[in-house]
Image (cartoon, grey):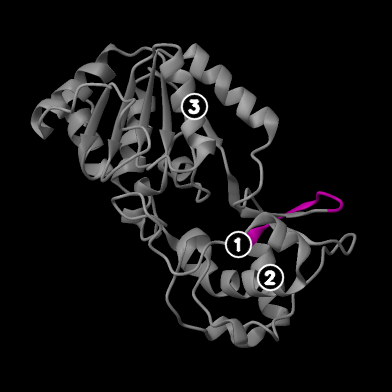
């Protein structure tokens, strides 16, 4: 077991020193980076599920027309607000950190593309991107904005819905509100259209995972920002870094799956912590 984290001020100084020492830093980010942008997360500070409804599963979406109705109805209502989200302090700080030249890659578990909008260039969208929709049959891709027009053309009553917004670009609707929703097919081949993201129960493409493993191997430290790491798709990279005796630095508010493995953990809002660390590096 690693030593417990020092008090916040000392932990912040240690983080700043670790960032200054790294020349090949790999960064892994999660939902905590985007909560300040108004995009909700799924878990509380103990890492426990905090929403009454679980997100849609891959097999459920692919196998049940009613599930696709429910998903796309919720998405049609939630998309405008999700799309309007702007980068927050954590995104800006990580873009500035990359600009210093010591970050090799940023791997994000988020699907909102806010890192790219903040200016980060070397980004791997581990779980895909919500601004694309892909046909499961012919693999054609259309933009989510264009797909929104198609959805609302078929379901104009949903354009004016106002409801509580949920993570991943959807909204909370009662199931009975979705039974009449018309789900359009692929305009090219008539196949099933799916957001170009990895749903729960789905698999991150093997080539993408392999590429991040290579990034871990080429790094001299791993920085985890705003993730509880409760999902194995991100946690596996922490395990690989630990196995190779590379420092693992964690910035998160609340418990993470890597608390016993991390070289250093800084508890707090990831935007505030990163901004302070950058100030310590003279990059603010």
- Which residue position is annotated with label 3? 237
Question: In the drawing, does residue 272 fall left or right of residue 157?
Answer: left
**Is label 2 in contact with label 3 (beta carbons under 8 Å)?**
no
Q: Position of residue 152 (x, y in %)?
A: 66, 78
- Of all residues shown, which one is farthest toward the front? 1
Mark before the other along the chain sequence, 1 or 2:
1
Q: Is residue 216 visible?
A: yes
- State the quadrant of the C terminus: top left
**34 or 52: nearer the eye?**
52
Considering only vertical position in the picture, is 1 above or below 108?
A: above
Whole-number angstrom distance, CA of label 1 to CA of label 2: 8 Å
**Is label 1 in contact with label 2 (beta carbons under 8 Å)?**
yes
Q: Name the residue rendered at 10%, 26% in the picture.
A: 10
Q: Secondary structure at mark 1?
A: loop
Q: Position of residue 275 (x, y in %)?
A: 22, 36
Question: In the drawing, does residue 95 fall left or right of residue 234?
Answer: left
- Which residue position is annotated with label 1? 56
**120 or 230: nearer the eye?**
230
**38 or 279: nearer the eye?**
38
Whole-number angstrom distance, CA of label 2 to CA of label 3: 32 Å
- Which residue position is annotated with label 2? 67
Q: Which residues are magenta?
A: 137-144
Q: Position of residue 15 (x, y in %)?
A: 22, 24
**88 or 198: nearer the eye?**
198
Considering only vertical position in the picture, is 41 above or below 206?
A: below
Q: Name the residue rendered at 69%, 28% in the picture.
A: 207
Q: Position of residue 83 (x, y in %)?
A: 50, 61
Q: Is residue 107 visible?
A: no
Query: Image quadrant of residue 13?
Result: top left
């Amino acid at each position: 077991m690693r030593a417990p984290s020092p008090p916040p001020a000392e932990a912040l100084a240690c983080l700043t020193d670790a960032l200054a020492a790294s020349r090949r830093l790999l960064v892994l980010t999660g939902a905590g980076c985007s909560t300040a942008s108004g995009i909700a997360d799924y878990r509380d500070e103990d890492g426990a599920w905090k929403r009454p409804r679980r997100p849609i599963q891959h097999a459920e979406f692919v196998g049940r027309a009613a599930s696709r109705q429910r998903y796309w109805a919720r998405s049609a209502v939630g998309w405008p607000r999700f799309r309007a989200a702007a980068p927050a302090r954590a995104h800006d700080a990580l873009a500035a950190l990359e600009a210093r030249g010591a970050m090799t890659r940023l791997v994000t578990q988020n699907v909102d593309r806010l890192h790219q909008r903040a200016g980060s260039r070397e980004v791997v969208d581990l779980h895909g991107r919500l601004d694309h929709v892909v046909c499961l049959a012919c693999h054609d891709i259309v933009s989510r904005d264009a797909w929104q027009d198609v959805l609302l053309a078929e379901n104009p009553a949903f354009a004016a819905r106002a409801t509580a917004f949920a993570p991943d670009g959807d909204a909370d609707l009662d199931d009975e509100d979705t039974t009449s929703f018309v789900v359009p097919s692929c305009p090219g081949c008539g196949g099933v259209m799916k957001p170009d993201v990895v749903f729960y129960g789905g698999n991150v493409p093997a080539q993408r995972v392999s590429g991040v493993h290579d990034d871990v191997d080429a790094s001299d430290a791993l920085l985890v920002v705003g993730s509880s790491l409760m999902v194995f798709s991100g946690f596996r990279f922490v395990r690989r870094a630990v196995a190779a005796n590379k420092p693992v630095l964690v910035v998160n508010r609340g418990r993470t799956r890597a608390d016993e493995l991390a070289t250093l953990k800084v508890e707090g809002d990831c935007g505030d912590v990163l901004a302070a660390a950058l100030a310590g590096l003279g990059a603010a």
